[in-house]
Image (cartoon, rainbow, N blue to C red):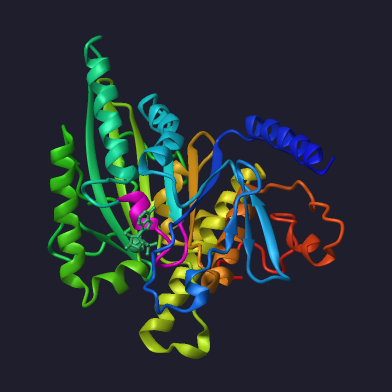
Amino acid sequence: RFLQERLERRKVHEQLQVLRGNIRVCCRVRPSLSPGAGAPKEAQACGITYPLPGSLCVHASEQRQQEFEFDSVFSGEATQEEVFDEVWPLIRSCADGYNVCLLAYGQTGSGKTHTMMGPERNPGLSVRALKALFDITAAEAEHGARRAISVSMLEVYNEALRDLLQSDAAKPLDVSAMGAGQLATGQERVPGLTWRPVACVDDVLAVLAEGSKNRATAATSLNAHSSRSHALLSVRLTDAAGQSSVLHLVDLAGSERIAKSEVAGQQLKEAQAINKSLSALGDVIAALQSKSGHVPYRNSKLTQVLQDSLCGSSKVLLVCCVSPEVANAQETLSSLNFASRAAQVELGPIRKAAEPATRKASAAGGGASPSPLTPGA
Ligand code: ADP
Ligand code: MG
């Protein structure tokens, strides 16, 4: 009977999906990074199970478990290709003229960069998306349709924008204050940002290499820096009539909560900037979900830059990346809580007879948390 109930809920959930439409949230669990024999038990144990397709359960401890449901859930075994299959319809939409935004959210080390960029021999969503766009463009060219594709690379660090395709890092950029969808034709959201025409995957790889090099030269430690800044790879498609659509591929800064007592100075400033922008992102997505008239883009540079792809007619996919280790369970729970509030799945608590402690915890997205839409809450 329990299973029956779950299946019925799943059906309701799927019907909701159809109604919900433009914003999708999925979760990807990184594979366990085979620690050596001497690693502590918490690092080895896998703290995540998959009760049903589209759901996952985090076992933070024997007493504490929390279950979540998303549009889709990818376990550590999922391939880059399988994750891309989820994304492909959005890429198709972008070629059809919609603005699209793909975002990877999660703590540092949870697989965001692997998902968005990936290693060269097993590329992530970005290269696959561009390859798909080239394929679509080539197929349409046979019918006489023309489309130009160009890309830009932008970093948002401490609420400042930097063009990664300019080696001269001293030149800061700003973002237009015009409302979402209100830019006139030819007017740029980020005036002065470099857009490079690309015609094939090799062109894209060359641009990516250039952007990464510029990003690395300004940072003392690239790993640390990249986890504290948002990286945007944006793709612009322009048809023969001059109409354009944009695909943003966003590798967000690490969402981990940084205790204020532990950092000071520059690190505190970084932590505050990340918290502010991720909160703003959550608030914008929630406002879009609730179809509330006011969408608070102004609260961060990140949401301002993305606003044309985070508005009524655009399509959004948030990929929540999490680590499977029990030692990361707190961060995993806070990422999943952020994502499920973005998804606004309100199906109520799952009834689990003998376990009153899990009831409240199971109300994923049900508003049980005291601090909605705050990363790391
Ligand atoms: P983040 O960008 O969130 O900080 P990374 O993408 O850099 O995390 O991932 C951390 C480590 O885990 C990297 O060494 C990466 O190669 C590896 N990794 C992440 N996801 C996967 C995956 N799905 N399969 C194999 N390795 C992965
Ligand atoms: Mg990364």
Position of residue 192 relative to residue 335, above or below, is above
Looking at the rendering, in which quadrant would you find the N terminus?
top right
Residue 213 place in picture, x, y as percent: 15, 61
For image coordinates 44% across by 76% down, the residue present is: 271
Judge left or right: residue 44 versus residue 116.
Answer: right
For image coordinates 29% across by 51% down, the residue present is: 118
The stretch drawn in magenta includes residue 108: yes
For image coordinates 56% across by 50% down, the residue present is: 285
Looking at the rendering, in which quadrant would you find the C terminus?
bottom right
Judge left or right: residue 145 versus residue 227.
Answer: left
Residue 170 visible in the picture: no
Query: Which quarter of the frame holds ligand 1?
Result: bottom left
Q: Which of 180 and 155 is in front in this view?
A: 155
Residue 353 visible in the picture: yes
> What count of labels does the image hold?
0
Position of residue 241 relative to residue 117, above or below, is above
Q: Which of 112 and 264 is in front in this view?
A: 112
Q: Which of 322 and 62 is in front in this view?
A: 62
* Farthest-out residue, front: 37
Position of residue 147 relative to residue 291, above or below, is above
Judge left or right: residue 362 versus residue 170.
Answer: right
Residue 342 place in picture, x, y as percent: 60, 51
Residue 373 place in picture, x, y as percent: 61, 61
- Quadrant assignment, res 80: top left
The stretch drawn in magenta includes residue 338: no
Residue 146 place in picture, x, y as percent: 23, 19
Q: Which of 98 and 175 is in front in this view?
A: 98
Position of residue 241 relative to residue 81, above or below, is above
* Farthest-out residue, top: 143
Q: Give the range drawn in magenta.
A: 105-117
- Quadrant assignment, res 59: bottom right
For image coordinates 52% across by 75% down, the residue present is: 42
